[in-house]
Amino acid sequence: MKTSKSPLDKVLGKLDDLDEVNLGILVQRLARERKLLETVFDVIRDGILVLDDTGMISYANIQGKRLIGLKDNPTGQISLLRVAPEIACALGLDQGNEGMQAEVIVREMEISYPELRYIRLYAVPIEETVMNKSQNMKIGLAIIITDITQDKVSLDQRIESEKVSSIMDLAAGVAHELGNPLNSINIHLQVLKRNFTSEKNNPEKTEKSLTTCINEVERLDGIIAHFLKAIRPQTPDFKKINLLKIIEETVHLKKDELSAKEINISMEAGVREPIINGDFEQLKQVFFNVIGNAIDAISCNSEIRVLTGREDRFVFVKIIDHGSGINKEDLSKVFEPYYTTKKSGHGIGMMIVHRIMRDHGGDIGIDSKPDAGTIVTLRFPRSSSRGRLLESSNTV
């Protein structure tokens, strides 16, 4: 089906036929439309940046300039990597055009210039249909920057509020999970009672019922522990730890799942000893959830790549799979509590990951494309000192 052209497109297609008067009218019309769009964009509270295919800033609204510290510099003459290297590196622009290959990029991160702030990035490649061809060519990147500093300041209070409003949903699921082991324990206790009161006591039957009861009690304990972990965050016990050791232990815990699907995990250590300050058990939970998601997303006889590296202020770990990927409409909801696309998922795994990473002064980013795969980037501060959030914000 052919798409209908706008009146402006039809005029632009006949530029060669326009005389000087009509060409002047067209230029004035384009100038008015550009002014209107700029006025609309400048009243938006989110920052908007448009990059060309070389990473140069071709457009920035007022909030976008404020968030990256760009004064009155004319756009088109300065690169994002130069004026906002933290953002550019987070989007992979320091690695050339390879950083623009993901269909959608979502990041929550801390920036230190022009002032300490927390921001959320949402970036989408701009495509242009090549003339006389059915393929699209990437010609730039559109970036939306949301200042979430105040949200971070009050995040703990909001999480508590969210717990109150959603605790019943989670509790209902837990109640259902508790029902099966409790029912099993009840049945076997009745068997034990009959066995003890019977003249023909059967030791083997008694031992079997006791073993079942013990196993079910342990199962109950696990369900309750998981429930408490989801609703009651614990203060990290910071110690010097090696991220590679945590990853190795996590892979060992997942060995049965990996073996069942014949999945290979390859390690590419860009840092020989990625040492950070963190809570070993909490970070093991982070990798357990992220690697578990990667296992669920890929088919049998596949591979998961784990890369480590170092930036100026962070040590990072990338978990890469070539699985089903995440749709655009789902990607922005990944960290929301109780949101899941899995049939058997509870929707709290990535919420826990997000909270643990925040408590460690780090951040998590997800690059994904349906049917191509997902890259989860975990960044941890190299220094034990963590910057304080702004006490106030002058957000326009």
Image: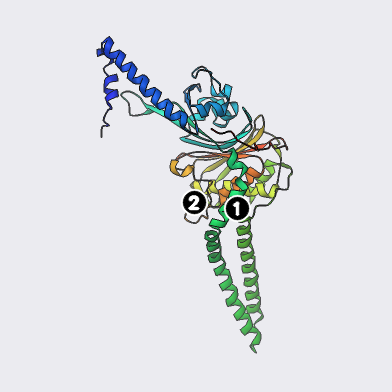
Name which quarter of the figure residue 383 lies in: top right
Q: What element does badge 1 sit on?
A: helix
Inter-mark Cα distance, 2 to 1: 21 Å
The image shows residue 126 at horizontal and vertical percentages of 42, 29
Q: Which mark is residue 182?
A: none
* Amino acid type at mark 2: Thr
Q: Which residue is mark 1?
A: 160
Image quarter in which the N terminus is found: top left
Q: Is residue 188 above or below residue 127?
A: below
Image coordinates for residue 331, horizontal then vertical, percent: 48, 42
Number of residues whose C-alpha sits closer than 10 Å to that of mark 2, classed few (under 14), some (14–19) or many (20 or more): some
Side of 229 where 5 appears, left or right: left
Residue highlighted by disc 2: 340
Q: What is the quadrant of residue 265 in the picture? A: top right
Residue 59, x across and y down, in percent = 47, 23
Which of the marked residues, 2 or 1, is nearer the chain's N terminus? 1
Q: Going by the picture, which residue comes out furthest to the top?
A: 20
Mark 1 neighbour density, 10 Å: few (under 14) some (14–19) many (20 or more): few
State the residue at coordinates (60%, 53%): 160
Callout 1, which amino acid?
A: Glu
Q: Quadrant of residue 15?
A: top left
Q: Are marks 2 and 1 in contact (CB under 8 Å)?
A: no
